[in-house]
Image (cartoon, rainbow, N blue to C red):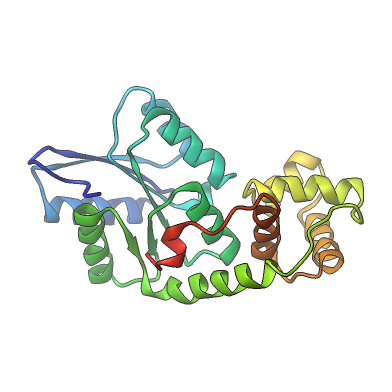
Amino acid sequence: MAIRHNGNPAHIAVIEENPLSRSMFQHIFTQISPINIKVAEFSKVADFYQALEALSFSLVLVDVDQLDSIECFAQKVKSFQKHATLAAFNAGPEKSSLHAAVCAGFRCFVSKRSRVEEVVLAIKQILDCGVYCDSALLLSIFDLICESLYCKNLNFSLSNLTCREIEVCQYAFQGLTNKRIAELLFISTSTVNNHLVNIYRKLGIKNRAQLIRLKLEQQKTILPDSIASGV
């Protein structure tokens, strides 16, 4: 779905800690359409949440590395503005973050590693079509599809895990980062990493993306069409 249509202004939220990145997006949006685009910049997610209750956004562009939980962020946005398009902007997300973002309803993925002219083209496509995926992320998407097929042949059970490992799993399913999981469980990040290594070994998998995939398969959930079609 197009972000800009019928000549109506597009209200866009940019959530990014780096002031240079925020300035870049402001410049790009102004150059593309100085009249029909209004941009609100936020350095912190908490500030965006406050504005979300009062303002209406057609596009939300966020650095997903700032999010404690991608799923919770998407649910928060959609609870106020159901038709807002979600776009991820970061330094090439790991597959677990990419998977969590797609499952949470993100339709656009822009890499910080792209050249400015590539970001301009990405923004234009997002505004016109409402979907975009950076070419650098296509390999990760392909890997996710392969892992999905692999996980369909595995049996998922938490019965062999310790209570602490199950807690780590539950937070991982929500898309929380290792750092955030450590904070919630009052343990170190390295301890979370060790728990995940043990979990992967016991379940016969290799990474967090496969862990989330196993959970979805247990719930008889398949990858969203946006992954299968390689948006």
Query: Is 4 rendered above or below residue 90?
Result: above
- The quadrant holding residue 121 is bottom left
Can residue 90 be seen by looking at this rendering? no
Q: Residue at x 69, y 67 (%)?
A: 151
36 sits left or right of 12 in the view: left
On the image, the x and y values in percent for residue 80 come to 40, 28
**The furthest residue to the top:** 54
Residue displayed at 67% across by 73% down? 150
Report if residue 159 is visible in the image.
Answer: yes
Q: Residue 75: x, y in percent? A: 50, 36
Work out whether residue 148 or residue 35 is closer to the camera in this orientation and state it: 148
- Residue 35, quarter of picture: top left
Residue found at x 34% / y 56%: 21
Q: Is residue 39 left or right of residue 230?
A: left
The quadrant of the rendering that contains the C terminus is bottom left
Residue at image coords 81%, 41%: 186
Q: Nearer the viewer, residue 20 or 225?
A: 225
Q: Position of residue 49 (x, y in %)?
A: 44, 31
> For this rendering, which residue is in front, 96 or 39?
96
Q: Position of residue 207 (x, y in %)?
A: 70, 67
Residue nearest the viewer, comparing 54 with 144: 144
Q: How many marks?
A: 0
| Residue 191 as seen in the image, left or right of residue 224 | right
